[in-house]
């Protein structure tokens, strides 16, 4: 099995991270020790961390470390969300035993694929009271979403949590080759692959970063930064990238979905 160059991105220097078999990357304004790669040097978008979250390190990695001529596996995870071995799925995993379960090497049955993305989360089954409270504008257009779970789509979920109409505006700025396909995807799917986590080869990673950061740059011209208030909307660019990742890797790569966990920290 081939070892994965895994980067764990965090906005806090958490002691348990120091014991992980991963490379650590710091984003935001916390004071990080020398154990961490810094995203505020060389070519960077460090000052956009409030809006881009872990993507600020992804951008830094792309511009300063990525070598597309290398043939190796590179992956990204987060301070409390981690890839785990398929044999560890469903087990009780915590801060004490996390290292026993972490995915460190590419399993043999994964080698025939060229990317790994997170197993999806479902968006259906939203409480009716929540849809009425946060999705009432969508209800006025399509009342059936209240009872038809298949219509509780990525578009509805985004409107409810990250600003009504924001995804629709952003869709118009997607590259011509993807725009219509992505529109269909967010309006038909009631699940997506979360977390801005993936494992792939340098050439594919370069294409992904080129596509997503070009799109987000165009989105900045529409949304800017000053009017993005509160946690759910201030990180708009990260949430847009999360939905696009789910679509892009499925369209352009031979992918497999792999288990992951969220740790209580």
Image: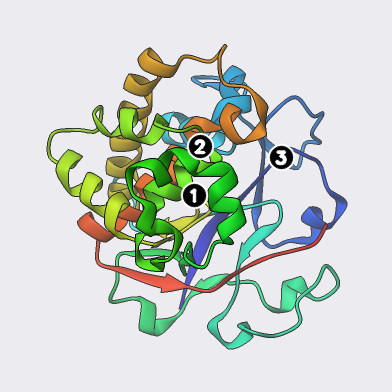
Distance Cα–Cα, label 2 vs label 3: 22 Å
User: Left or right: where does residue 210 sit relative to residue 98?
Assistant: left
Under circle 2, the secondary element is helix
Would you name the residue on which mark 1 appears? Answer: 196
Q: N-terminal of the two: label 3 or label 1?
A: 3
Q: Looking at the image, which residue is at 52% across and 21% down?
A: 45
Q: Residues within 10 Å of mark 2 (few under 14, many from 20)?
A: many
Q: Residues within 10 Å of mark 3 (few under 14, many from 20)?
A: some
Distance Cα–Cα, label 1 vs label 2: 8 Å
Q: Is residue 227 above or below residue 12?
A: above
Q: N-terminal of the two: label 1 or label 2?
A: 1
The quadrant where residue 114 appears: bottom left
Would you name the residue on which mark 2 appears? Answer: 238
Would you name the residue on which mark 3 appears? Answer: 36
Q: Residues within 10 Å of mark 1 (few under 14, many from 20)?
A: many
Q: Is residue 62 shown to the viewer in this render?
A: yes
Distance Cα–Cα, label 3 vs label 1: 20 Å
Q: Looking at the image, which residue is at 75% across and 24% down?
A: 29
Q: Is residue 74 shown to the viewer in this render?
A: no
Residue at the limit of the structure toward the left, as seen here: 177
Q: Nearer the viewer, residue 173 or 108?
A: 173
Q: Which mark is residue 79?
A: none
User: Left or right: where does residue 14 sit relative to residue 26?
Assistant: right
Q: Is residue 67 above or below residue 145?
A: above
Q: Looking at the image, which residue is at 39% across and 57% down?
A: 145
Under circle 3, the secondary element is strand
Residue at the limit of the structure toward the bottom, as seen here: 87
Under circle 1, the secondary element is loop
Relative image position of residue 164 (x, y in whole percent): 45, 33
Residues tagged 1 and 2 counted as in contact (Cβ below 8 A): yes
Relative image position of residue 1 (x, y in whole percent): 46, 79
User: Left or right: where does residue 112 sit relative to residue 235?
Assistant: left
């Amino acid at each position: 099995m081939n070892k994965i160059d895994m980067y764990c991105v965090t906005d806090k220097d958490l002691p348990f991270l120091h014991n992980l078999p991963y490379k650590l990357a710091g984003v935001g304004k916390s004071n990080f020790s020398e154990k961490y790669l810094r995203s505020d040097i060389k070519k960077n978008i460090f000052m956009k961390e409030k809006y881009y979250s872990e993507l600020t390190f992804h951008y830094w990695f792309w511009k300063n470390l990525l070598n597309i001529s290398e043939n190796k596996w590179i992956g990204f995870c987060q301070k409390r969300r981690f890839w785990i071995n398929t044999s560890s799925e469903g087990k009780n995993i915590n801060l004490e035993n996390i290292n026993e379960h972490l995915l460190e090497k590419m399993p043999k049955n994964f080698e025939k694929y060229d990317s790994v993305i997170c197993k999806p989360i479902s968006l259906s089954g939203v409480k009716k009271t929540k849809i009425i409270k946060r999705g009432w504008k969508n209800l006025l257009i399509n009342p059936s979403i209240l009872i038809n779970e298949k219509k509780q789509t990525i578009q509805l979920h985004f409107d409810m949590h990250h600003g009504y109409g924001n995804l629709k505006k952003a869709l118009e700025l997607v590259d011509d080759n993807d725009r219509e396909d992505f529109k269909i995807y967010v309006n038909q799917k009631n699940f997506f692959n979360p977390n801005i986590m993936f494992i792939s080869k340098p050439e594919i990673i370069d294409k992904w970063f080129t596509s997503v950061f070009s799109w987000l740059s165009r989105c900045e011209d529409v949304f800017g930064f000053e009017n993005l208030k509160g946690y759910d909307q201030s990180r708009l660019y990260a949430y847009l990238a999360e939905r696009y990742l789910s679509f892009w890797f499925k369209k352009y790569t031979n992918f497999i979905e792999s288990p992951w966990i969220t740790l209580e920290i």
